[in-house]
Amino acid sequence: MRYLLAPLSLAMAACAPNVDPTPQSAKLMTWGDLTTRDRPKSDATLAYGAHEYQKVDIWLPRTPAPHKTVLMVHGGCWTTSIADRTLMDWAAADLRDAGYAVWNIDYRGIDVGGGYPGTFADAGAAADAMRDHAARFNLDTRKIVAVGHSAGGHLALWLAARPKLPADSRLRTADPLPIAHVVSLGGLPDLERTANTPDNGCGVKVVADLVAGANPVDRYRDTSVAWLLPVRVRQDHVAGLQDRIIPLDLKTDFVAKAKEAGDDATLHRIERTGHVELVSPGTAAWDKTRELIAKAFAQ
């Protein structure tokens, strides 16, 4: 992938502790370990807007229709120059092989016209476009499971929380696509907490840039999922115990807040797992994610 390697490698190096807690026999994956694999291809791509990043890739299984459908959201610190939807190609292909359709969305990052409201509006428009094309691609939209990685974990949860947006929010829409279940992989749902955690791999400035156009009195009320609790949507949070990009306490704190608010939220800690393993087929973390997705559709 042309965007991801250098910026996130630097971020990982900046966040690395002095002593590597990972056994020598279980070194963490790098982004190159994933992105140098043969790249699978999606079955279709469509535009939901005029910008080059207002696109969705559709991955269709060879199983009988209608297809159980996963809404997928990539990460990259809400910054397009770090990552785009193609980071999720291998995960999407693996889910396609497992019999799911995947609606893999892209959106404008803070560096290409996103931020507030652009990044959020794009994510919402990309998700809602699924209903417009469901018949064409034989998608079953009665139960949508959203899967997001890193900053995409925040956006996946935010998409599920949209019905809770304040009435005067610029991001509120009349009929957002309902999300039945969210699987957040190393996510950052509490933006305010993230902005006050300098050792997060995205840094604190990127959060300030993301919410800069929001309500000046309270920039987090319709951008941070923590302010929209309870979401009333089941949540599974998958965390690598050796993740050097997203500190574990960002997940534990949010899950505690979600439970206290009454949400069904579960944290899954995966040993010998960093940030890359979370979206890499063949790892323990991805095996757990597939298990959680299957369980979500079975419920």
Image (cartoon, rainbow, N blue to C red):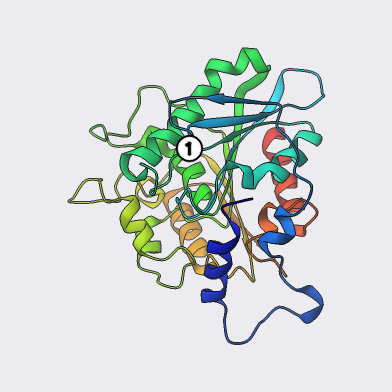
Q: Name the residue under label 1.
A: 160
Q: Residue lying farthest bottom?
A: 18
Which residue is painted at 54% across and 66% down in the image? 245
Q: Residue lying farthest top?
A: 135
Q: Residue lying farthest front?
A: 2
x, y percentage for residue 187?
53, 55
x, y percentage for residue 284?
77, 58
Which corner quadrant of the image does residue 12 belong to?
bottom right
Type of the residue with mark 1: Ala
The reply to whether residue 292 is visible in this rendering is: yes
Q: Could you tell whether 32 is left or right of 202 in the image?
A: right
Which residue is painted at 62% across and 31% down in the image? 57
Q: Is mark 1 on a helix, strand or loop?
A: helix
x, y percentage for residue 36?
74, 54
Q: How many marks?
A: 1
Q: In this view, does 27 lie above or below 42?
A: below
Q: In this view, does 112 lie above or below 36?
A: above
Q: Nearer the viewer, residue 79 or 69?
A: 79
Q: Is residue 131 above or below residue 276?
A: above
